Image (cartoon, rainbow, N blue to C red):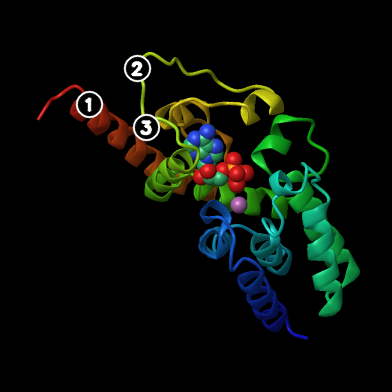
Amino acid sequence: MQSQELIEKTASFVQDRLKNAESGHDWWHIQRVWNNTKLILQTEEADALVCELTALLHDIADSKFHNGDETIGPSIAGDFLTSIGVHPSTIQHVQQIILNMSFKASLGEVKFHSKELEIVQDADRLDAIGAIGIARAFNYGGYKNREIYNPDVPFVEKQSKEAYKNTTAPTINHFYEKLLLLKGRMNTDTARQIAAIRHQFMEQFLTQFYGEWNGER
Ligand code: ADP
Ligand code: NI
């Protein structure tokens, strides 16, 4: 099977599987990360098949809904890719990236590294910043019934996986705890350039937000 056909089959599989997914990691998130991946691949040298398959499969099972088991996603991805005849070395690479690319995993010990991981991780992080990132953050906060902002709750930069999981802080805090840090965590030059624009937009949003909060016109 040609690469293009493998990618299309994978996209259909993922779209179908994520029909009822929560909106933070629904098919539209996957489609945006896939698009970001293709955008980055225009100027970065890497195995495009590995990158695109990983972009499509990286959130196939959220460990949050599987008692924190981070091997479920790679396992479902592996079974599917085997069923459509993807080469075992490609499958192994995709699985390694899924296991190691999340923000939380990146706070711990880095266990695996490749150019392809860098690209898909950047593509995923780009979807957490800018206008989309703002929308996703407030959507998440609303789902968790958090305040949008509370000037009395200071923000803390998260260091441990545990601290990251257990926050109940207002959504604006999430900007300082994660979103504004992502620009500095991009792996590729291409993503760094895209992130700079999206970062600036978030800064502008925050300035406007505080202005309105304080009753300025
Ligand atoms: P990822 O898919 O990047 O590993 P998460 O599952 O933590 O991340 O987050 C999914 C989306 O929800 C992201 O856009 C993220 O910024 C947002 N989000 C996560 N935690 C919070 C939070 N405490 N407050 C607001 N938004 C959050
Ligand atoms: Ni994702």
Identity, as a three-letter code, of the amino acid under mark 1: Trp
- Estimate the x, y position of residue 195 in percent, counting from the top left: 46, 44
Identity, as a three-letter code, of the amino acid under mark 2: Pro
Estimate how packed mark 1 is, as few (under 14), some (14 to 19) or many (20 or more) residues with alpha carbons within 10 Å: few
Question: Can you see residue 168?
Answer: yes
Please tell me whether mark 2 sits on a helix, a strand or a loop: loop
Residue at label 3? 148
Q: Residue furthest left?
A: 217
Residue 151, label in figure? 2
Among the 4 quarters of the image, the one containing residue 216: top left
* Real-space Cα separation, disc 3 to disc 2, in angstroms: 10 Å
Please tell me whether mark 1 sits on a helix, a strand or a loop: helix
Query: Which of 139 and 197 lies nearest the eye of the viewer?
Result: 139
Residue at screen point 56% across, 55% down? 22
Label 1 with label 2: CB-CB less than 8 Å: yes
Estimate how packed mark 3 is, as few (under 14), some (14 to 19) or many (20 or more) residues with alpha carbons within 10 Å: some
